[in-house]
Amino acid sequence: MTRLFAVVSLGILVAACGGSKTTAKPALGDGGETYTATTTTQQFIDQLVSAECDFMVRCSYLPDKSTCLAYVDRLSSPGTNSLAYAIDQGRMTLNQSNLPACIAAFSNLSCTLGSSNSSTLNTPCAAAAVGTIASGGDCVFDGECKPGLECDKGSCTASCCPGVCVATKPLAAVGGSCTSDSNCVDTAYCKLSYNSTTGSFDGICLARVATGAVCTDYGSCPGNAQCVGTTGSKTCVALAKDGASCANGLSCENSTSYCDQVKGTCQPRIKDNAPCTLPDAGASAALASGCFNYSECKNGVCRHLPLADEACSNPDAAAINECLLVGKCVGGFCQADPPKPLCTVAAAKAAVADAGVRD
């Protein structure tokens, strides 16, 4: 399993091709290949990627900007490729005058867990690239649709699904159905329960409880609080600040801190090559050892996780995945996952049709 990072993203900024590259535009609908953006579009994406990398380094999710840029340069993200393709094909309009506000929004993102970073980005960054597809038009992601519309993909759950632009559905109030917290209003969360009859999960939006109140579910507290305590006696407790107690499994508020099991308080994360201690065996130890998100505690020392093409060994019991960001350790080296193909309307429809034939 790839090591997880709490990465704030526009939904399109997971990875991108670096540099300014120019190529002839493919015909609309060509799919199944990676896409090389026109110079203007690539420069726009490069600025967004640079801003996001600055945030990821500032909040200690990655060690330095060069590592972040090398990562996004190596993988052509389906999301970012789709953005570039949509802009170059006129499915989205690029508004350069609104880009500075979007870039500035990244500098205002908080490293505090539970902060509303997505809302900080949504308004200024949505204005930088606006969809042009009207209601009823084909789409593969929300950004292609005009403001006030979203891409409805029905029941398709594949990585590339065809959709239709429809009116944006209002967020479900308490009591409404849902599949994730994002379907519910801000004051509610989505509680999922397994339906043995259908073999799927049913969700209902329930009201969040205030900090200090009794809680029963992991998601029932506000974003800056956590449901902790023993079964039958749990309370929403505010995330621990630096130097404060983090007993009973309470998480630290600052992403650059961790819960020191010896001191019982939130302390700054341990730098590479500094001593560390594994509090227990198993996958959870790597995250609880105090090393930064891009390192692991191995043989009593915080070690930088190897990148793609760097030497690796079979991870010990504490490692979730020895290779940083992507890929896995194969033959003594971290092998990156291959780039995923571009998702277009034609490619999405073809994939669904093919799946129907094979089923």
Image: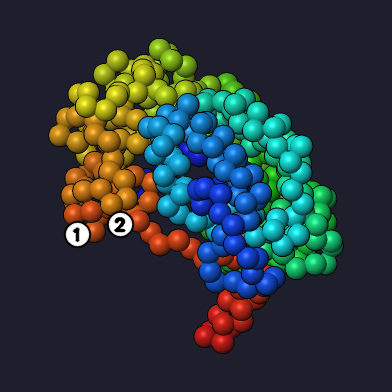
Indicate the position of residue 163 as horizontal and vertical percent values. Answer: 71, 67
Please rate how many residues cluster around mark 1, counting C-alpha atoms within 10 Å: few if below 14, some from 14 to 19, many from 20: few
Q: Is residue 126 visible?
A: yes
The amino acid type, in three-letter code, at marker 1 is: Gly
| Circle 1 residue | 331
Q: Which mark is residue 335?
A: 2
The amino acid type, in three-letter code, at marker 2 is: Gln
Q: Residue furthest left?
A: 299
Q: Is residue 292 left or right of residue 93?
A: left
Query: Residue at horizontal 40%, vertical 16%?
Result: 245
Indicate the position of residue 49 as horizontal and vertical percent values. Answer: 55, 41
Q: Is residue 132 left or right of residue 348?
A: right
Whether residue 319 is situated above or below residue 351 in the rendered picture = above
Q: Is residue 105 left or right of residue 1?
A: right
Indicate the position of residue 226 as horizontal and vertical percent values. Answer: 51, 29
Query: Residue at horizontal 66%, vertical 49%?
Result: 40
Q: Quadrant of residue 266?
A: top left
The local secondary structure at tag 2 comes to strand
Q: Are marks 1 and 2 in contact (CB under 8 Å)?
A: yes
Q: CA distance from mark 1 to mark 2?
A: 9 Å
Query: Residue at horizontal 70%, vertical 37%?
Result: 99
How are the colours assigned in the image? rainbow
